[in-house]
Image (cartoon, rainbow, N blue to C red):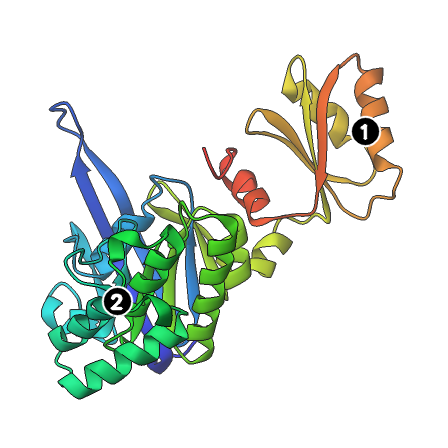
């Protein structure tokens, strides 16, 4: 982990509670006593399903959501005590399109720079540089309403770094994009990071977290369940092969049958199926699993085989699928 001087985002007991709907008196924790440190220059990911607390966390770190309790610092500035100073240090891309529809593509960049105190000449030069960097040069005079989803997202990222923020926050940056636009944005994010940009992103796409992030915090119900590099998280499953078995009858009975076989590290019920983690099993392991189920009178309906993924880690931790 980075030293104190290298930490650029830090939270202590960061919490946000909301009143329950329908007039109930209880409160619901969207984020529950979050302790987090992000190092300068890394891409850090918050991975979890919708409702995990990812967007609320970013909201508190970017001054848009007031914490119920706890503290948060960005670049050494307490975001709750000095929100105006904190905003000078951050760039934000939200889930919704926030481009100014009364301005064209170039003007969205230029006036953003002017708003943050850039001189006209500097703002013009930086806007033109970013149009080139984000492959939008030929769209400079285009109405932003005419942009594709991928182009609009690239423009929002370009605008968010126009004032050279210390930290870039990306909230579900590729949600709703087609695969080609998603890959294009991944490339842009990696280029920014290679140039030294610190990035905190939220996502429910395991591939995105795996491809982009140096470290990932798996989040659910407002809490961090695990935090490590993507490779470290996948190693924590203690398996080199994952077999997912859907079968009729009591899944706990199938767990008992599978657990007794050589080569099975663990077997458990998760997301309506039986998850069998194999360690060092040979190529004939799958037929042995099926024969064991058949011998116990259990009808197997479907089987899938995969290497451990971040979704496997999430299922192991929560018993449910990442996209539930």
Q: Which residue is depicted at the point 12% across and 73% down?
A: 115
Residue 289 tag number: 1
Mark 1 falls on what kind of element? helix
Could you say which is closer to the camera, residue 307 or residue 73? Answer: 307
Q: Which residue is depicted at the point 40% across and 55% down?
A: 150
Q: Quadrant of residue 19?
A: top left
Regarding residue 64, the answer to whether it shows in the image is yes
Q: Looking at the figure, which quarter contains the C terminus? A: top left
Residue 141 tag number: 2
Q: Quadrant of residue 255?
A: top right
133 horizontally vs 321: left or right: left
First of labels 2, 1 by sequence position: 2
301 up-or-down from 308: above or below: above
248 up-or-down from 162: above or below: above
Mark 2 falls on what kind of element? loop
Q: Residue 260: image x %, image y %?
A: 79, 30
Q: Which residue is depicted at the point 80% across and 15% down?
A: 296
278 up-or-down from 292: above or below: below
Q: Residue 301: image x %, image y %?
A: 71, 19
Q: Quadrant of residue 185?
A: bottom left
Q: Residue 235: image x %, image y %?
A: 64, 55
Q: Which residue is depicted at the point 40% across and 45% down?
A: 176
């Amino acid at each position: 982990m980075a030293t104190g001087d290298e930490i650029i985002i830090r939270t202590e007991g960061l919490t946000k509670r909301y009143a329950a709907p329908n007039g109930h008196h209880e409160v619901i924790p969207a984020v529950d006593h979050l302790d987090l440190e992000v190092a300068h220059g890394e891409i850090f990911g918050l991975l979890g399903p919708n409702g995990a607390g990812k967007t609320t966390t970013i909201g508190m770190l970017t001054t848009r959501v007031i914490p119920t309790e706890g503290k948060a610092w960005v670049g050494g500035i307490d975001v709750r005590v000095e929100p105006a100073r904190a905003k000078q240090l951050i760039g934000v891309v939200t889930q919704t399109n926030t481009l100014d529809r009364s301005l064209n593509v170039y003007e969205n960049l230029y006036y953003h720079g002017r708003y943050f105190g850039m001189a006209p000449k500097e703002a013009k030069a930086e806007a033109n540089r970013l149009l080139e960097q984000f492959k939008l040069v030929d769209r400079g005079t285009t109405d932003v309403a005419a942009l594709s989803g991928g182009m609009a997202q690239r423009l929002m990222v370009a605008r968010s770094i126009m004032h050279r923020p210390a930290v870039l926050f990306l909230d579900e940056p590729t949600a709703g994009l087609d695969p080609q636009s998603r890959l294009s944005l991944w490339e842009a994010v990696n280029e920014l990071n290679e140039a030294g940009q610190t990035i905190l992103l939220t996502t429910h796409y395991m591939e995105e977290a795996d491809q982009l992030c140096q470290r990932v915090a798996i989040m659910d119900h407002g809490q961090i369940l695990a935090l490590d590099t993507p490779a470290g998280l996948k190693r924590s499953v203690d398996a080199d092969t994952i077999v997912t078995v859907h079968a009729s009858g009591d899944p706990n009975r199938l767990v008992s049958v599978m657990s007794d076989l050589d080569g099975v590290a663990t077997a458990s019920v998760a997301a309506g199926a039986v998850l069998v983690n194999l360690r060092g099993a040979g190529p004939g392991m799958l037929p042995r699993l099926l024969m064991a189920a058949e011998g116990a009178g259990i009808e197997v309906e479907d089987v899938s085989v995969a290497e451990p993924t971040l979704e496997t880690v999430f299922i192991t931790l929560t018993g449910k699928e990442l996209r539930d």
